Image (cartoon, coloured by chain):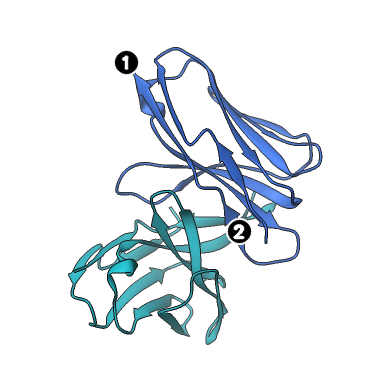
Chain colours: A blue, B cyan
């Protein structure tokens, strides 16, 4: 069974600080997605990474896919209250039509 | 926006009653999924469909059935609801984005079983 472990589960930091969220697995994925979810809404796709070692930037968010395509990280620079939410990573299995989700990181940014 | 709607958005029902949740998409996607989301468990796959009348089980399929009689609609049925099925249910479709299969989600249905 493929598993994706996210850490930390909860993170509360001050506005302006930097943070990193990790997504790790012992399995190889063909791609990995990061989503953000706000209360009462469905997850919204932030980014998809496909190539081992790939780095993508979305304004203050930097996403990296591990060289072996087993792990990923999300780094937020100068966090803002609008970054608050549940961040989910999801990996697409190599041969299946399913996507495996991590349990999420709940991020709270204090003004 | 992947053109996904879910109905109802909220439902309260009693133990033992049947419940059907509907997912509707407007963009002719082949793959559709039903997930449930519970604190501490993230999103768990219930069932998915890879075409009209083609469905398969996910990791938490017990107590649920699905049907897909046309491309745009994917129905999730709880034949006899239990309190353990109180959850938020999300429908998703699969689409190609950034060179990879990616899922896009509906707004969710909050189901409470009393």
| Residue beneath the point at 39% across and 51% down | A42
Is A93 displayed left or right of B79 in the figure?
Answer: right
| Residue beneath the point at 54% across and 69% down | B59
The lab-note entry on whether marks 2 and 1 share a chain reads yes
SS at badge 2: strand
Residue bearing the label numbered 1: A111
Question: What chain is tagged by disc 1?
Answer: A
Q: Position of residue B76 (x, y in %)?
A: 39, 77
Q: Nearer the viewer, residue B51 or B33?
A: B33
Packing grade of label 1 (10 A; few <14, some 14-19, many >=20) is: few
Q: Is residue B29 visible?
A: no
SS at badge 1: loop
Q: Position of residue B11 (x, y in %)?
A: 21, 67
Question: What chain is tagged by disc 2?
Answer: A
Residue bearing the label numbered 2: A99
In this view, A31 is above or below A97:
above
Q: Where is residue A92 in the image (x, y as percent from the top left)?
A: 66, 56
Quarter of the rendering occupied by the C terminus of chain A: top left
In this view, A90 is above or below B16:
above
Among the two numbered marks 2 and 1 on one chain, the one whose residue lies closer to the N terminus: 2
In this view, A14 is above or below A102:
above
Q: How far apart are marks 2 and 1 (CA)?
A: 35 Å
């Amino acid at each position: 069974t493929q598993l994706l472990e996210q850490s930390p589960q909860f993170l509360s930091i001050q506005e302006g600080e930097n943070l990193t969220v990790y997504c790790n697995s012992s399995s190889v994925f063909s791609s990995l997605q990061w989503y953000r979810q706000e209360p009462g809404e469905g997850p919204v796709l932030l980014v998809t990474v496909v190539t081992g070692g790939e780095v993508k930037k979305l304004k203050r968010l930097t996403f990296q896919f591990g060289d072996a395509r087993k792990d990923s990280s999300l780094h937020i620079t100068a966090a803002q209250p609008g970054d608050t939410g549940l961040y989910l990573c999801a990996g697409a299995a190599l041969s299946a039509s399913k996507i495996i989700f991590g349990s999420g990181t709940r991020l709270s940014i204090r003004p | 926006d992947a053109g996904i709607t879910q109905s109802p958005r909220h439902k309260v029902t009693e133990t033992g009653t049947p419940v059907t949740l509907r997912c509707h998409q407007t963009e002719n996607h082949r793959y559709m999924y039903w997930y449930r989301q519970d604190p501490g468990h993230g999103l768990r796959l219930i069932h998915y469909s890879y075409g009209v009348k083609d469905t398969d089980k996910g990791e938490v399929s017990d107590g649920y059935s699905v049907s897909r009689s046309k491309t745009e609609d994917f129905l999730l049925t709880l034949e006899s609801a239990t309190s353990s099925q109180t959850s938020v249910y999300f429908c998703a479709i699969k689409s190609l984005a950034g060179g990879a299969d990616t899922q896009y989600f509906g707004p969710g249905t909050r189901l409470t079983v009393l």
